[in-house]
């Protein structure tokens, strides 16, 4: 067991759990304000991909020494993740939640790209396995993530168009 690897994986696990709590609170508050959830059927697939991704890293990477270049790339992605979270604030969720009458966010990273959170997730799914020298894990989960994000982005765009 490599303690640095375990620390990295522990951080990512705690971060994801904290985000789920934050997202759940935001979802409940938004729904109480009249927001509606769209295309909930695909959500379990997203959760499954992320749980299997992180679980595979705990299984395969906990005894590997991290590559500092890829770790630096992952840290940059975390900064981008924080930028997205800070920009959306109480509107950030892990589900497709639409508040009727509210304008789309056009600040922060949303000035530059559509769906910046998904771009961050694409990077994270690919980069974290590379931190531990597991390119085939990066490939497998990048493909699975691409499949669920294809559905997700299509459904979110549809919901946002109203």
Image (cartoon, rainbow, N blue to C red):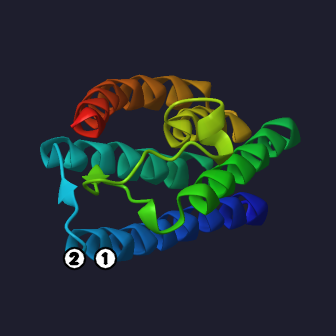
Viewer-proximal residue, 103 or 78? 103
Q: What's the residue at 32%, 24% (across, down)?
A: 150
The spot of residue 48 in percent (x, y) is 29, 48
Around disc 2, counting alpha carbons within 10 Å, would you say few (fewer than 14), some (14 to 19), or many (20 or more)?
few
Whether residue 59 sits left or right of residue 6 in the image: it is left
Q: Viewer-proximal residue, 49 or 41?
A: 41
The answer to whether residue 64 shows anywhere in this view is no
* Residue at the far front in the pictured view: 101
Q: Is residue 45 above or below residue 22?
A: above
Tag on residue 103?
none
Q: Count every numbered label the image shows and give the total.
A: 2
Question: Is residue 142 shown left or right of residue 132?
Answer: left
For the residue pair 70 and 76, the one nearer the viewer reads as: 76
* Residue ID at (36%, 31%): 149
How far apart are the alpha carbons under marks 1 and 2?
A: 5 Å
Which residue is painted at 53% across and 33% down in the image?
122
Q: Is any atom of residue 54 visible in this view?
A: yes
At 30% from the left and 69% from the top, the residue drawn is 30
Q: Position of residue 10 (x, y in %)?
A: 61, 67
Which residue in the protein does label 2 denote?
32
Eyeballing the image, is 63 above or below 155?
below
Secondary structure of the residue carrying tag 2 is helix
* Residue 5 placement (x, y as % from top left): 71, 57
The quarter of the image holding the C terminus is top left
Dividing the image into 4 quarters, which one contains the N terminus? bottom right
Mark 2 and mark 1 in contact (Cβ < 8 Å)? Answer: yes
Q: Report the residue that reaches farthest toward the left.
A: 41
Residue 127: name its quadrant. Answer: top right
Image spot of residue 120 (x, y percent): 59, 40
**Picture quadrant of residue 11:** bottom right
**Mark 1, residue position:** 29
Which class describes the residues within 10 Å of circle 1: few (<14), some (14-19), or many (20+)? some
């Amino acid at each position: 067991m490599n303690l640095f690897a375990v620390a990295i994986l522990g951080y990512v696990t705690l971060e994801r759990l904290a985000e789920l709590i934050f997202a759940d609170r935001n979802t409940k508050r938004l729904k109480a304000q009249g927001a509606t959830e769209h295309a909930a059927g695909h959500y379990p697939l997203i959760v499954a991909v992320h749980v299997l991704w992180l679980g595979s890293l705990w299984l395969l990477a906990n005894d590997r020494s991290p590559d500092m270049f890829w770790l630096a790339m992952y840290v940059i992605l975390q900064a981008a993740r924080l930028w997205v979270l800070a920009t959306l604030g109480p509107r950030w969720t892990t589900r497709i939640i639409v508040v009727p009458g509210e304008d789309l966010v056009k600040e922060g990273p949303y000035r530059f790209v559509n769906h910046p959170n998904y771009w961050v997730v694409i990077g994270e799914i690919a980069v974290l396995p590379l931190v531990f020298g597991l390119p085939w894990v990066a490939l497998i989960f990048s493909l699975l993530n691409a499949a669920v994000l294809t559905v997700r982005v299509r459904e979110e765009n549809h919901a946002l168009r109203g």
